[in-house]
Image (cartoon, helix red, strand yellow):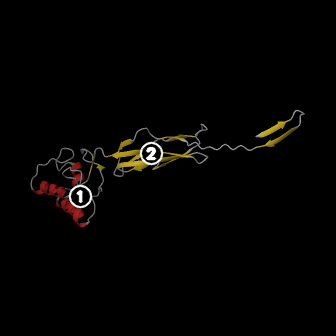
Amino acid sequence: MTWTATDPAGNSSSCQQEVIVVDTTVPMLTCPGDNISTLCTGADGAVVQFDVTATDNTGNDNATVVCEPPSGSTFPLGITTVVCTATDPSGNTATCSFEVEVLCGGFVLPGDCDGSGSVDLTDAVCILSILFAGSERRLSCGDGSIQDPANVALLSWNGSSDVDLASAIALLNWKFLGGHEHTLGRACVPIEDCVDVCD
């Protein structure tokens, strides 16, 4: 900026002054208005996409947005808090957060013979009672019989594709002696024609 002074005789003098405009306004950051809830698509959870936008006080979309975890990540079962930060060219920052909840739907826990939502001693007893005590217990999948292919996938803990004494022993070995997990793991997984027994 140039300042000029002039007297009545027309004499003048000028000087220059530097004016620095400091930006102290934080960006306007917009997270999803509501928390996100979705069903899992596998044992690892679900891939979740979301939109977060930011504008600077210049009216331009020149603020950088970083979210952790980022959009497109695989979110595990349960609730995850996403924190997003917007930074403008002057270094001003704004943050917002929201929750992503991944639910089990139509998923079961391998080995959960009694449908309790957990795998424990009662499930080994459940398998043994079906095999040797003539239990009429209806199982979780399909027609409820032990012959139903979905129930074989659910109860064959050792992955032999048969529900037999070895399945119960494998479950007990895993539970009490540090043995191997079920071939499908310990997470909720989809088994066709099974009801939803995972919370």
> Which is in the foreground here, disc 2 or disc 1?
2
Res 119 → quadrant: bottom left
Q: Amino acid at mark 2?
A: Ser
Residue that carries the numbered disc 2 in the rendered image: 97
Q: Are marks 2 and 1 in contact (CB under 8 Å)?
A: no
Kindly identify which numbered label has been placed on residue 78: none
Alpha carbon separation for disc pair 2 and 1: 41 Å
Residue 153 appears at what percent x and percent y? 24, 52
Residue 33 appears at what percent x and percent y? 43, 38
Residue 35 appears at what percent x and percent y? 39, 41
Q: Is residue 86 above or below residue 173?
A: above
Kindly identify which numbered label has been placed on residue 157: 1
- The residue located at (15%, 47%) in the rendering is 138
Please, which residue is most extreme toward the top here? 8
Q: Nearer the viewer, residue 132 or 118?
A: 118
Res 142 → quadrant: top left
